[in-house]
Every structure is written in C-alpha cells, then in structure tokens.
Amino acid sequence: MFEFSQLRCFVAVAEELHFHRAAARLNMTQPPLSRQIQQLERQLGLVLLLRGSRAVRLTPAGEAFLRDARRLLQAAENATQQARRVAQGQRGQITIGFTASSGYGVLPRLVGVARARLPEIELSLREMVSQDQVAALQAGQVDLALLRPQPPVAGLRTALVQREALRLALPRGHRLAEASEIEIPALEGEALITFPPVEGRYFHDLILGLFRQAGVAPVRLQFISQTHSILALVGAGLGVAVVPQAAERLRQAEVVLRPLAGPGIPAAELMLAWREGADNPACEALLEVLRPDWTQLSPG
C-alpha cells in the first residue's frame, strides 16, 4: 500500500510537471523525489508519469489518480486538523446536568456563552435533581452539573454561579396575597408545600430551617420535587410554598409571588460542579471561558 509521503510527491510533480520544481516545492532533492514516484508506480502496477528530456506528462491513469490523490491528502489534512481541535478543546461534546430551576436563567446563559465562544462544541443537556447530578458526575455520565449546594465529595470541584432571593408562593385569593412582603410568622397555621428531604434536600433544609427559626410549625406538609409542580398545587389552593426567585418566570395565573421579609432570610445558591482531572478537553476549554465570571471556587 502506498504512503501519504508518496502521494504528496506525486501530486507535486503532477502539478509542476517538472521534477526539479517539485523537489524545490517539497524542500527535498530530486533523487529521493524520483524514488518516491517510482515506488508508488511499482506498488500500483501503473505508469503515472511519462518522463521526457525536458518535460513530464501525466498518463490517463496518472490524471485519474491525481484527482483521488488530492482528495486523500485533503481528507488526511482535515482529519489532522479536526483531531487537533478536539485535543485543544475547540471541538467535542459536553454533557451538562441541570436542575429544573436553573433552566430558567443560568443554563441559558451558560449555553449562550458556549455557543458564542466555542461554537464547534456540541452540548447535551440532562435535567436531574442535584443528588442525581453528583452521582452522574462521579460515574462520568455528565461533564458539568448545575446543582444546589451538596455535602463535599472527593474529586469534585464547585464554583458558586448564582445567589437568588426566595419568594413566597400564595394562591391568588389568599389572605396575604395583597401584601408587598411577608414575614414567616404570618404563615402560622398554613399548609406548606415544599421540597422532599432526599431529592430536594437543599431546599427542604433551607425552608424548614426558616420556619423553625421563626417558631412556626406548618399544619400540614406535602413534598414535591419540581418547582412547577409545587406552584400548580399552590394555585389549586392546597397550601403555600417558598420557592427560588426563578419561579417568577413560570407565570402561574393562579399564583402570586411575594418577597420574604424579616431577619435571616437566606439566598438560594446554585453551583457549577465538575470532576477534578477529567479528561474531556472541551470541558476544560468551557471552564476556562466561564472562570472570569464565576471565580468563587470552593474546595472539592
């Protein structure tokens, strides 16, 4: 089988129709160039060039072979360039896990940055609760994760990417619906719809901690994993809920959202997480693009 070096020599001679000029173009001397062509012809069992005392001509077989030789050389060059771009993180694929609420703000921003700065990288998106995203990161099923703060996990790094206010969701006809802001003690005796203790551990602990701090005990608790489902139940009059501010984008007709007032009202945090030492160059390239904006790194 012929080699690409032989193809390059043949194409140079076929285009220059002169061995000396072709050798100069390839930065080599004429004798090794002639040997490369001769070896190529022997391997093919064909005469590709007719050598004259002053000129070189292509045989019909040489003309046909020239077209394919050019295509092969171009394909090899393209393959080399594509491999280099993948190795440099300019091409490739990144799988990103995200929580439902991050899909209303941070995720679109991240996707926009990736498309603008790294347009040849393909993004694959997977909606998951935070706990499942940690497991997916550890298993190598996702490269990046947009999740709520979790207990530290060896081998994972995180960056704080957003802090957002909390909002109280009320049915439109609720006694507090017209208030400009509401303190937790005003919710004494209310049914509370909130996040579950396992799948939604971060918000579950955050919200119930607020009620305990205020000395308020809800008369009934219902646990629902997704913000849009919580709002649907609030709209149906089954209780009130504390949700992240991103819920304002859902625009539930039967629900009003009001700021929480009083001491010690925390903000909800969203983290970007990734595996330390991961071997996806595209992921590393995207992290480099994002770091100027999201520099609050916490130990992994």
Image: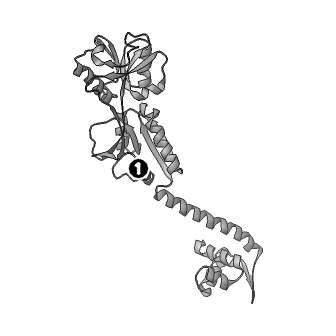
**Quarter containing the N terminus:** bottom right
> Residue 189 in the image: x percent, y percent?
29, 10
**4 sits left or right of 65 in the view:** left
> Residue 77 in the image: x percent, y percent?
58, 65
Is residue 261 visible in the rendered image? The answer is yes
- Given residues 61 and 223, the one toward you in this image is 223
- The image quadrant of residue 238 is top left
| Amino acid at pointer 1 | Leu
> Residue 235 in the image: x percent, y percent?
44, 15
Q: Residues within 10 Å of mark 1 (few under 14, many from 20)?
A: some
User: Measured along the vertical axis of the image, is residue 278 above or below residue 12?
Assistant: above
In the displayed orientation, state which residue is furthest to the front: 180
**267 sits left or right of 51 in the view:** left
In the displayed orientation, state which residue is furthest to the right: 60
User: Measured along the vertical axis of the image, is residue 278 above or below residue 10?
Assistant: above
State the count of labels: 1
